[in-house]
Image: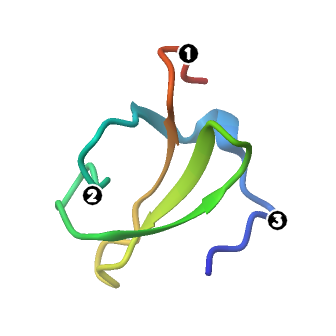
Amino acid sequence: MLILDKIDAQNLDCYILNDYPTTCGLCGAQTDFEDITDKIQLHQCLDESCGYKFITEEDEHCF
């Protein structure tokens, strides 16, 4: 699981959630995620060579 401590969400890219599974915005690999709130998730790419971290949100108001 991801660790939310020491993550500055203001400095992460934000994507809008949709009906499709979320994949890495850089390499397209699957991601692991944790819910930050009921509408916001913190994702991390499962490809060890990538490791990209980003936020997803249900509505149009990304950070």
Q: Nearer the viewer, mark 3 or mark 1?
A: 1
Secondary structure under tag 3 reads loop
Q: Position of residue 14 (x, y in %)?
A: 47, 34
Amino acid on which disc 3 is placed: Asp
Secondary structure under tag 2 reads loop
Give the crowd class for mark 3: few <14, some 14-19, many >=20 residues within 10 Å: few
Distance from disc 3 to disc 1, alpha carbons, whole Å, reads 23 Å
Residue for badge 3: 5
Q: Residue at x 50, y 20 (%)?
A: 59
Which residue is at the front of the view, 16 or 18?
18
Give the crowd class for mark 1: few <14, some 14-19, many >=20 residues within 10 Å: few
Question: Quick one: quadrant of the N terminus?
Answer: bottom right
Q: Residue at x 27, y 57 (%)?
A: 23
Disc on the earlier residue, 2 or 3:
3
Q: Residue at x 54, y 41 (%)?
A: 12
Give the crowd class for mark 2: few <14, some 14-19, many >=20 residues within 10 Å: some
Amino acid on which disc 1 is placed: His
